[in-house]
Image (tube, rainbow, N blue to C red):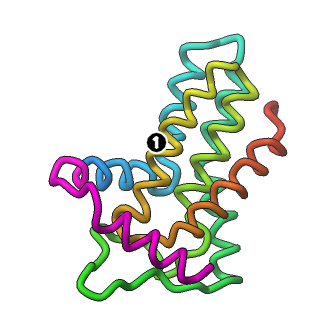
Amino acid sequence: MKDLDRRTLRFLRTEWHTPGLEGAAKVLGRAGNNGAIWFGVGVLLALLDGSNREAWLVCAVLGPVAIGLNYVVKLIVRRPRPELAGLPPLGGAPSSLSFPSAHATSSFAVATAMTRVEPWGALAFVLALVLAIGRPYLGMHYPSDVLVGAILGVILGLLVPLSI
């Protein structure tokens, strides 16, 4: 499994790299820090959809909360971020810990919760997937970090109560 993880990371770190794609991945990565993008989307939806306001606000808060819960797992596992010879990461991170990916956890938690609020909330999975793939693309995470983060996020998104 470790070999497949490393080979997949090297592939994502070396293929389809253009200045435009790298720039977009970096911008999305920064927007995903601390669940900020999900907080913003949740608040915007709460303003636009008064009938589901409370549920959208739960979704808004879920992103940052998922980041915090994810960090507890990181502290337990203590997996260092990947290092590939000659391929330094293309972004920074607030922690040297890699497993699981907080971007994937928060993104899939919120996308799952948004789908529970409204069926069209499933569109959030497109953004969640792009954010998650961007992490190994930039060399910030092993693909398994992202996969486990996504699974944790889906579980969290299914379990969170959508009313306060």
Spot occupied by residue 56 in the image (x, y as percentages of width and height): 65, 28
Side (left or right) of 53 relative to 88:
right
Q: Please give the range of residues in magenta.
A: 1-23
Q: Residue at x 58, y 82 (%)?
A: 2
Q: Disc 1 marks which residue?
A: 37
Question: What kind of secondary structure does the magenta stretch mostly adopt?
Answer: helix
Q: Residue at x 15, y 54 (%)?
A: 19
Residue in the foreground of this view, choosing between 54 and 88: 88
- Disc 1 marks a residue whose amino acid type is Ile
Query: Residue 16 magenta-drawn?
Result: yes
Which quadrant of the structure image shows residue 47? top right
Query: Residue 84 magenta-drawn?
Result: no
In which quadrant will I find the C terminus? top right
Spot occupied by residue 67 in the image (x, y as percentages of width and height): 60, 59
Residue in the foreground of this view, choosing between 46 and 127: 127
Q: Badge 1 local density, few (<14 within 10 Å), some, or many (20+)?
A: many
Which quadrant of the structure image shows residue 159? top right
Q: Residue at x 53, y 43 (%)?
A: 128
Q: Residue at x 50, y 32 (%)?
A: 41
